[in-house]
Image: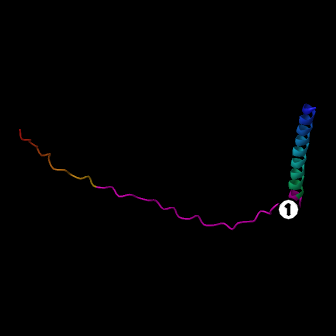
Amino acid sequence: MAMLGLVYILVTFIVCFALVHVIKLAVVGFFSLKKKPPEPEKKPEKKPEPVYYIVEKKRARKSYSEPKEIQFKK
């Protein structure tokens, strides 16, 4: 008897799940019928904007003096 109750609960769940989704799809389809497709608007031609390039200055290399010799006390 408990197994029969489990089957009824499962069938009820599947039927309700399917019914809710069918109703949601019907509502979406109904509202999509009301909307008119947007008319494409003609855009006036725009002049192309100028292109700016970023130019980096080359840095001068630093010149280093000769290395100094270090002596340690013993």
Q: Position of residue 2 (x, y in %)?
A: 90, 33
User: In this picture, is 60 found above or below 13?
Assistant: below
Name the spot of residue 18 as percent of width and height, x first: 89, 44
How many numbered dots are placed on residues in this image?
Answer: 1
- Is residue 52 within the magenta segment? yes
Does residue 26 appear to the left or right of 58 in the view shown?
right
Residue at 53% x, 64% y: name it: 50
- Measuring from the top left, give residue 40's x and y in whole percent: 77, 62
Q: Is residue 40 above or below residue 61?
A: below
Q: Quadrant of residue 43?
A: bottom right
* Residue plotted at (83% across, 60% down): 37
Dominant SS of magenta comes to: loop
Say left or right for 5 vs 43. Answer: right
Q: How is the image coloured?
A: rainbow
- Residue 2: in magenta span: no
Callout 1: 10 Å neighbours few (<14), some, many (20+)?
few
| Magenta residue span | 31-59
Residue lying at 89% horizontally and 39% vertically, measured from the top left: 9
Q: Residue furthest front?
A: 1
Give residue 68's position: percent from left, percent from top.
Answer: 12, 46
Q: Quadrant of the N terminus?
A: top right
Q: Which residue is painted at 19% across and 50% down in the image?
A: 64
As drawn, which residue projects farthest toward the left? Answer: 74
Front-lying residue, 2 or 57: 2
Q: Nearer the viewer, residue 39 or 69?
A: 69
Residue in the foreground of this view, choosing between 16 and 35: 16
* Residue type, label 1: Lys
Instruction: For mark 1, give the secondary structure.
Output: loop
| Residue where numbered disc 1 is placed | 36
